[in-house]
Image (spheres, rainbow, N blue to C red):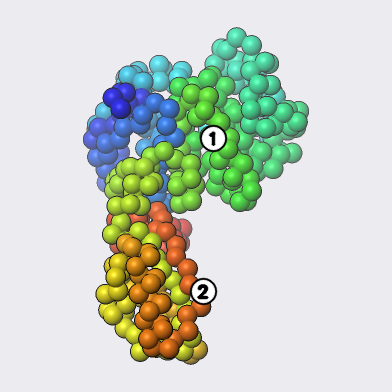
Amino acid sequence: MTTSPIIQLRGVTKRYGSFTAVNGIDLDVQPGEIFGILGPNGAGKTTTLEMIEGLRAPDSGTITVAGFDAVTQVDEVRKIIGVQLQSTSLFPYLSANELMELFGHFYGIADPKQRASDLLARVDLGEKANARMEQMSGGQQQRLSIALALVNSPVVSFLDEPTTGLDPHARRSLWQTVLDVRSSGTTVVLTTHYMDEAEFLCDRIAVMDGGRIIACDTPEALIRSLPQDAIVKATASGNPAWTESALAALPGATSARLTADTNNTSIAIGSADVQATIVALLALADRDDVRLTDLASTSANLEDVFLALTGRSYSDSAEEEVTA
Ligand SMILES: Nc1ncnc2c1ncn2[C@@H]1O[C@H](COP(=O)(O)OP(=O)(O)OP(=O)(O)O)[C@@H](O)[C@H]1O
Ligand SMILES: [Mg+2]
């Protein structure tokens, strides 16, 4: 594919005082993709988005959006992008319709009323057109804020953590909304700290940590880059005389962990060849008269990618930041 990127960042750095929030990042977003920036709290995701949106100027580096410079041509950039506002900052006493029309007037679009009803229908809020913000659920408010980010038919739509705080059902319904936005031809750049969301929704993901992009690829390619492609798990009744190094030497195995309690031993084996590893494990159990229960294999996921890249577990990084 030789399409030129719709968004391009080169050597972009942002400092707050002596603290470097974004540290020399390069990024290409292709037209028509859903591009995710994934990273724990404080990774630099929002700062990066705000620089692309022209809301913050980088200290160094260049950013272009559809060929416009995000620093020197910020007015042109703003016309062609849609930015999702945090729902809490929207006027609580205006109805969905009124807010949509207000935004339509801001952007000077031809028929704000029609646009409002089209977009509200598209995000499945047709029945809530006359409801005030304060009368809507969190998920409905998030969907409205996405509709507001689409009023000017943007070339690129930026969604900063569009599903944070939603229940699992509302999150999945919002994923569908994002997919619909992309189907209509809009490029979507979103941030998230949900691994499953990034994996399901994004064509490509930039994994950010400490202001740097530590990996950028399709979710599948990121996962495939791991030395193990699956984890074989089982519970052994009793405490067999097995060692982690012996299990890690089974066919296909790349690593192994044993956790024993009084009655059982939990087994987890990283494997690049699930079939070979399971066959060997069953043979071993047979030979040593060990009964295995809960035998299962799970594929590696982005959580494992983050661990492999940083040496830290993703959930621990997130918690550290929250309590810091
Ligand atoms: N206006 C500011 N002044 C000083 N430091 C800031 C400012 N804005 C952000 N930072 C710092 O820059 C770092 C990156 O912040 P940013 O908001 O970009 O992170 P994030 O990845 O969006 O995190 P989150 O997942 O919590 O939204 C953080 O350590 C933050 O404390
Ligand atoms: Mg943020």
Label 1, label 2: how far apart the Cα atoms are = 37 Å
Picture layout, residue 121 above or below residue 313? above
Q: Looking at the rendering, which quadrant does residue 255 occupy?
A: bottom left
SS type, badge 1: helix
Q: Is residue 56 visible?
A: no
Instruction: Give the number of the disc on residue 294.
Output: 2
Residue 72: in sight, yes or no?
A: yes
- Label 2 within 8 A of ligand 1 by Cβ: no
Q: How many marks?
A: 2
Q: Secondary structure at mark 2?
A: strand
Going by the numbered disc 1, the residue's amino acid type is Val
Above or below, 28 against 213 in this view is above
**Mark drawn on residue 42:** none
Residue 178 is labelled as 1
Residue drawn 48% across the image and 23% down it: 185
Mark 1 or mark 2: whose residue is earlier in sequence: 1
